[in-house]
Amino acid sequence: MQEEGTSIHKYVYSSALVEFVSSANACCAFFEDLKGTEGRDFISESVKHLSLVYSKFLHTGTSEPVFESSGEPTVSEQDWSELFQKISMLLGPHNDVLRLADEGEFDRSEVVSHTISEDLSDVYQELRDFTTIYSRGVEELMNDAAWELNVRFAEHWGKKLLRALQALHELYVSGVDPTENE
């Protein structure tokens, strides 16, 4: 048991995981404090934060869960909805993007309409749920939260982050400023 505890301790306090937690916290803090942020700045800062989060996550490695059940979500539906609305307002008509339908999606058409705000709100929820549990300092819970985040990364949030990043990249390189009237 001592060896397992040492292994968990090494993993949850590894420099790679700590750096990821730092970037995830900074990303969440950015999304939580959008007051006064202009559209062009939002695009630029989002690209920076999302790129860093993705890059840092790729170095975190994996673990095995200690407990059978997962941690409780900490981001409420209201929190998610408020962020979704803020981002929608910031991006205006540039929030809507077309993308190829994922395999098995309900919509059977090849191209579907989607919003950047939905993907970003989903990514925020995953990151904030993880960082909240991680910040509690209980190593087994920290480990399991990292394991679950890794599973969900493969299932959906990694894809959503990249989809949002690609859409924001297009806005960024095109010089779009959502606050300007077109």
Image: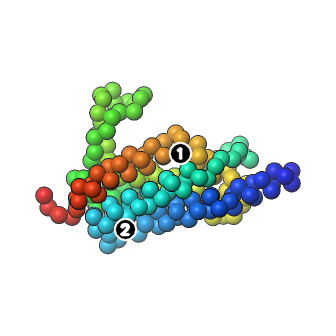
Q: Is residue 82 visible?
A: no
Q: On the rendered structure, is 92 left or right of 130?
A: left
Q: Crowding at label 2, few (<14), some or many (≥20) Cα neighbours within 10 Å?
A: some
Nearest the viewer among 180 and 118 is 180
Q: On the rendered structure, is 101 left or right of 57?
A: left
Place of residue 177 in the rendered image (x, y in percent of width and height, measured from the top left): 22, 62
Measuring 37% from the left and 64% from the top, which residue is drawn there? Answer: 45
Q: Is residue 19 visible?
A: yes
Place of residue 121 in the rendered image (x, y in percent of width and height, measured from the top left): 42, 53
Q: Which amino acid type corresponds to the residue marked 2 in the rendered image?
A: Leu
Q: Report the residue marked by disc 1.
A: 153
The residue most toward the right is: 2
Up-down: is 45 above or below 119? below
Q: Which of label 1 and label 2 is nearer to you?
A: 1
Measuring 71% from the left and 55% from the top, which residue is drawn there? Answer: 11
The residue most toward the bottom is: 36
Q: On the rendered structure, is 4 left or right of 18?
A: right
Residue 34's tag is 2
Measuring 34% from the left and 63% from the top, which residue is drawn there? Answer: 44
Q: Which amino acid type corresponds to the residue marked 1 in the rendered image?
A: Phe
Place of residue 56 in the rendered image (x, y in percent of width and height, measured from the top left): 54, 56
Nearest the viewer among 66 and 71 is 66
Give the mark, 1 or 2, whose residue is nearer the N terminus: 2
Q: On the rendered structure, is 54 left or right of 136?
A: left
Tell me the quadrant of the picture where the C terminus can be found: bottom left
Report how far apart the C-alphas of labels 1 and 2 lie in the structure.
25 Å
Measuring 81% from the left and 50% from the top, which residue is drawn there? Answer: 4
Residue 42's tag is none
Q: Which element carries disc 1, helix, strand or loop?
A: helix
Place of residue 157 in the rendered image (x, y in percent of width and height, measured from the top left): 48, 46
Colouring of the image: rainbow
Q: Which element carries disc 2, helix, strand or loop?
A: loop
